[in-house]
Amino acid sequence: KPSPVKSAVFSVPSYACQRRTTLENHNTVLTDALSLLAENAELSDEDGRGVAFRRAAAVLKALPSAVMSISQLSGLPCLGEHSLRVIKDIWENGASSEVESTKVSERFKALKVLTGIFGVGAKTADRWIREGIHDLHQLQNSGQTLNRAQQAGLQHYDDINQPVTKAEACAIEEIVEKAVSSVLPGAQIILTGGFRRGKQTGHDVDFLITHPEEGREVGLMPKVVSWLEAQGFLLYQKTTRNSYLESKADGPGRPPSNMDRFERCLSIFKLPKMEKQGAKDSQNVTENCLQANQKSDEPECPEAAPDRRWRAVRVDLVVSPISQFAFALLGWTGSKLFERELRRWARYEKGMSLSSHALYDNNQRKYLRASSEEEIFAHLGLEFIPPSERNA
Ligand code: GTP
Ligand code: MN
Ligand code: MN
């Protein structure tokens, strides 16, 4: 018997970069389940399965309303057998047995805890687990040698695993703005990553830095880092220099790697707490931060001090020459799946290679220039999708 209210069959295009995905998600129960399986696959070095679950979740995120029946899903792209089984399980039993058993599995829990340490990836976590290390306590007592990033990650574990708020991102933006304009007047910074897509929280804060005159940005990062270091804003930083021209890996015929070669800095900021700050004196964040940093006495164990006046925040800085700025901006705004889908679309539908540096047309055998994101979408034959709708 047909149900009295007929639910519409959904229809969405198959590449995430052809769709508008806002932060308004009508199917969080389903997408949370599929995202958890994606995360588990990624942590288990099964990237193929991870992407399949990410694509399935992204299709459901793009739907205009909640799924009311399985029949509405017929004809949707990217929903493989496995994802459909998970959805049906939730549908019929209220939860997916696979998701529930993954959540409580010792291995998954250990992978989550260990990769929560800045500087620890899935491979390292897996090796530690095989050596019997499942939590931070066991790691600290194991005598494992940790590199500088991992030491900082362990030291600031709780702070780094607490989401960064939009207000904190704005405070850091002011600090970076001040650093950049002090060392190179005229240089510009822009907030990228999840915050540019309109997210209210993030795991870090991402910035892109450039200068309107090509070439003036060369050597900028070490100067910015020195300024920040001198003011006491950095708990950790690792800068890698630009290697784009040396490697030429994005050149004709070669697949663009998704790792770019910009001058970049992965850091942990020491952000003074802002709670006593009213909205009216928000223009003074930098001044107040400077004072707070100068006043603070370093305790033996920083995270343990009960009323310390700062918190650790992960910050990524990238410097791009203006000629590559549009590509860098598009590449660093995300989401990760949206980026992956843009590159896949470029390659398989257009015969082009897209990276965070450039767009190469394999048929015309030439680079396609662009000075805005809009131009890049146009080169790719895609409708422009604004950052707030790239939340695939
Ligand atoms: P949250 O930080 O959790 O809010 O999410 P996010 O979307 O900001 O993620 P993240 O900070 O990890 O990355 C931001 C964007 O930068 C994403 O689109 C990534 O694909 C991109 N990104 C991260 N690392 C690299 C890299 O090494 N090279 C390039 N080209 N892009 C990167
Ligand atoms: Mn981010
Ligand atoms: Mn980042």
Image (tube, rainbow, N blue to C red):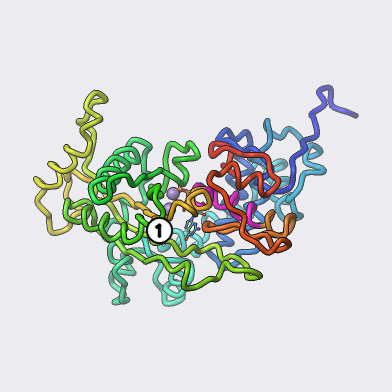
Quadrant of the frame with the N terminus: top right
Image quadrant of residue 51?
A: bottom right
- How many numbered marks, from 0 up? 1
**In the image, residue 189 above or below residue 107:** above
Q: Amino acid at mark 1?
A: Gly
Q: Tell whether position 141 is magenta.
A: no
Residue 310, percent across and down?
21, 45
Residue 260, percent across and down?
49, 62
Query: Is residue 29 left or right of 269 when viewed as pictured?
Result: right
* Residue 85 seen in the current view: yes
Residue 33, percent across and down?
60, 47
Which residue in the structure is indicated by mark 1? 116
Q: Can you tell me whether the CB of the residue at mark 1 lies under 8 Å from the nearest atom of ligand 1?
A: no
Residue 76, percent across and down?
77, 44
Q: Residue at x 59, y 35 (%)?
A: 25
Query: Is residue 249 left or right of 348 when viewed as pictured?
Result: left
* Residue 50 seen in the current view: no
Predominant secondary structure, magenta span: helix
**Nearer to me, 313 or 238:** 238
Quadrant of the frame with the C terminus: top right
**In the image, residue 161 above or below residue 236:** above
Q: Which residues are magenta?
A: 330-343
Helix, strand or loop at disc 1?
A: loop
**Nearer to me, 322 or 15:** 322
Q: Tell whether position 342 is magenta.
A: yes
- Dot 1 crowding, Cα within 10 Å, few <14, some 14–19, many 20+: some
**Nearer to me, 137 or 267:** 267
Q: Residue at x 33, y 38 (%)?
A: 170
